[in-house]
């Protein structure tokens, strides 16, 4: 049995665009999340959602696989989890930095990158305390809007780390908290455009909204 971060795991092939990506993921991820002990949950309400491959991640990976002229651009993935969007950007030739506040997630993303022969960086990042550099041409955010308390910190992180004329890309399964985030973004001068993508995953279909956010005037 393979183990990464002391968890039993498997490698799966995910079709993305016209190709595919080899992705390591924990076995029994749902059980791992549900059995997180109270002392691990803590005041930050940390649940290991990183261990699941979410349909919104597949949608965002498809977005980057189809993006023209991505080669040579810099891409940051926030809350990367299993990091499928960032891996797709690396496959397309971007310079990718994957971030999460779970070291286990970063371990999985490094193993997946190695299995695909991708070169990228991984860093710990808590979006409540974002750095101010470096900046990136694209910031990838897959299914991050499920808690209202995260909305302001995420926008603050974008304002600090998105390069001039850069694009922040969100994929969202139309969670009920998400409209509040885009309303807040509009109030802060962000311009949003969206389209909808249907993702087939594990025998079901999911409607995923993909949003591009740009600063007003850029």
Image (spheres, rainbow, N blue to C red):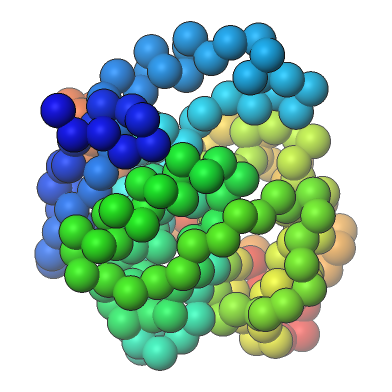
Residue 117 spot, x, y in % from top left: 20, 70
Can see residue 31?
yes
Q: State the residue in front, 208 or 166.
A: 166
The answer to which image quadrant residue 3 occupies is top left
- Give the residue drawn at x 86%, y 58%: 187
Quadrant holding the N terminus: top left
Residue 161 spot, x, y in % from top left: 70, 72
Question: Is 37 drawn above or below residue 213 in the view shown?
Answer: above
Question: Is 57 drawn above or below residue 113 in the view shown?
Answer: above
Q: Is residue 183 left or right of residue 29?
A: right
Q: State the residue in front, 57 or 78.
A: 78
Q: Is residue 161 left or right of residue 73?
A: right
User: How many labels were placed on the picture?
Assistant: 0
Q: Is residue 174 left or right of residue 4?
A: right
The answer to which image quadrant residue 195 occupies is bottom left
- Give the residue drawn at x 75%, y 28%: 44
- Give the residue drawn at x 70%, y 32%: 147
- Give the residue drawn at x 39%, y 36%: 5
Residue 54 spot, x, y in % from top left: 39, 37
Can see residue 79?
no
Quadrant holding the C terminus: bottom right
Residue 211 spot, x, y in % from top left: 54, 58
């Amino acid at each position: 049995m393979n183990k990464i971060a002391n968890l039993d795991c498997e490698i799966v092939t995910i079709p993305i665009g016209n190709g595919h990506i080899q992705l390591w993921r924990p076995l029994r991820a749902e059980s791992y999340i549900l059995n997180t002990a109270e002392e691990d949950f803590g005041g930050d309400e940390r649940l290991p959602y990183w261990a699941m491959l979410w349909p919104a991640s597949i949608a965002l990976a498809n977005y980057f696989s189809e993006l023209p002229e991505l080669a040579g651009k810099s891409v940051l993935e926030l809350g990367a989890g299993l990091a499928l969007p960032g891996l797709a950007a690396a496959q397309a030739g971007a310079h990718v930095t994957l971030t999460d506040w779970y070291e286990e997630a970063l371990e999985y993303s490094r193993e997946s990158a190695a299995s695909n022969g991708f070169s990228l960086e991984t860093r710990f990042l808590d979006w409540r305390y974002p750095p101010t550099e470096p900046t990136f041409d694209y910031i990838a955010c897959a299914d991050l809007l499920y808690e209202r308390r995260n909305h302001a910190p995420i926008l603050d992180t974008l304002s600090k780390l998105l390069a001039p004329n850069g694009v922040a890309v969100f994929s969202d399964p139309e969670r009920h908290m998400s409209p509040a985030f885009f309303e807040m973004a509009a109030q802060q001068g962000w311009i949003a455009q969206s389209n909808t993508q249907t993702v087939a995953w594990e025998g079901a279909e999911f409607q995923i909204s993909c949003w591009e956010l740009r600063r007003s005037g850029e």
